[in-house]
Image: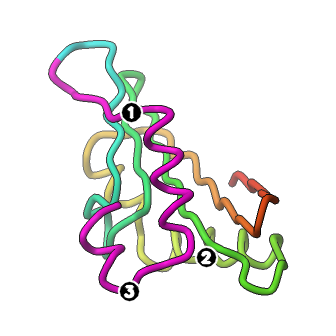
Amino acid sequence: MGFHQREGHSSADGYEGELLSRHGTGTAAEPGNWLIQSNAETGEGYSNISVSTPARTGIVIELKYANDGDLEAACTEALSQIEEKKYAVGLQRQGMKKIIRYGIAFWEKECMVVMR
């Protein structure tokens, strides 16, 4: 969990940590590696997870906890935040040619993923 996420503390924090622990973080030092960052400054804010690949595909992942169990609404909110905070623009400035956006919502033991 990043410093910026902790300030407001989100129920999605544990899920973010779980995703990152399973996939690790990368380094851009060697060709062929993916750079995976948590709470990196991207665009006009800090995306939960951003990924840069050697094929110049950028991935933005925004996580939301659906307090009321409405996973679809939480996914929509996550995707809206990606657009509003211009996270994709930040990755494009880093040389990414294609951007994939994921809104992921959690509620108890349920999960929903929407890609745009």
- What span is in magenta? 1-29
Residue sitting nearer the eye, 1 or 113: 1
Residue sitting nearer the eye, 37 or 85: 37
- Could you give the CA–CA distance between mark 2 and mark 1, rounded to whole angstroms? 26 Å
Residue 9 magenta-highlighted: yes
Which residue is denoted by mark 2 in the rendering? 80
Question: In the image, which is nearer the foreground, mark 2 or mark 1?
Answer: 1
Disc nearer the start of the sequence (3/2): 3
Determine the residue positioned at 44% across, 43% down: 20
Identified by mark 2, the residue type is: Ser
Residue 55: x and y in percent read 42, 23
Q: Say which element carries label 3.
A: helix
- Could you give the CA–CA distance between mark 3 and mark 2, rounded to whole angstroms? 19 Å
Identified by mark 3, the residue type is: Gly
Q: How crowded is mark 1: few (under 14 residues within 10 Å), some or many (20 or more)?
A: few
Identified by mark 1, the residue type is: Gly
Disc nearer the start of the sequence (1/3): 3
Determine the residue positioned at 37% across, 37% down: 52
Q: Say which element carries label 1.
A: loop
Which residue is denoted by mark 3 in the rendering? 8
Residue 18: x and y in percent read 52, 47
